[in-house]
Image (cartoon, grey):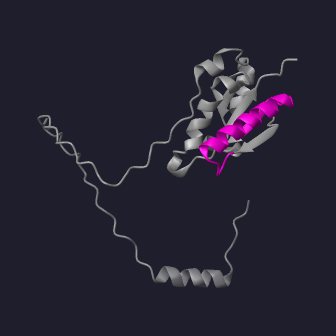
Amino acid sequence: MAKKRLSDDDLALWQRVTAQTEPLARAKRPVSRPKKAKPVAAPTPAPPAPVSAAPRPPAKPTITVSTALLQSQAPDRRTATKLKRGQIAIEARLDLHGMTQSEAHEELRRFIAGSRELGRRCVLVVTGVGARGGGVLRRSVPRWLAEPTLREAVLNVAAAEQRHGGQGALYVLLRKKRS
């Protein structure tokens, strides 16, 4: 691929800019390596720092799901991997943004029951990450899905891929409805 040549106007402009610049002074590097320091006695521990008044942002919680939820009739490894990678088609979505905990809990129950009734297998529940990554719904939804009323409908839960909401969303694999 041939290099693109500057036009005469661009070349004149470049020469004016470079004529006004000065090269940076280079720092001299030491020629010899510094000698090894003599071992120093272990420092005495400093007194604990006073607690600051400014609250720290909470650490980003990871989404954990009760192992009891995953033990009975867990999907085969291939299905579980596809779910984690977001490769199973999402048949319905529930967005819980802006809802209170009680509203979100009730809506989640209705959504899971209705989706299972309609024969859906994979749904997406969007909780949002919350302020500073510590959203109440983000922490609560996995716990709600592990409750006895929803556990019988839920086969597996996985954190969503970034394209589907990342840490602010969950894939929920539903059990097949028994006739």
Q: Using the image, determine if residue 133 lies above or below residue 25.
A: above
Q: Position of residue 4 (x, y in %)?
A: 70, 69
Q: Using the image, determine if residue 15 lies above or below residue 153.
A: below
Q: Please check the rendered image and state whether residue 137 is part of the magenta-colored stretch, yes or no.
A: no
Residue at image point 53% right, 35% down: 62
Residue at image point 50% right, 50% down: 132
Q: Using the image, determine if residue 76 lies above or below residue 99.
A: above
Q: Nearer the viewer, residue 137 or 64?
A: 137
Q: Which residues are magenta?
A: 96-124
Give the position of the N terminus as an image quadrant.
Answer: bottom right
Q: Residue furthest top?
A: 72
Residue at image point 74% right, 28% down: 173
Q: Could you tell me if residue 88 is visible in this image?
A: no
Q: Position of residue 108 (x, y in %)?
A: 70, 37
Q: Position of residue 88 (x, y in %)?
A: 78, 32
Quadrant housing residue 48? top left
Give the position of the C terminus as an image quadrant.
Answer: top right
Q: Could you tell me if residue 1 is visible in this image?
A: yes
> Could you tell whether 116 is left or right of 59 in the image?
right
Q: Nearer the viewer, residue 156 or 101?
A: 101
Q: Please check the rendered image and state whether residue 118 is part of the magenta-colored stretch, yes or no.
A: yes
Q: Position of residue 73 (x, y in %)?
A: 72, 15
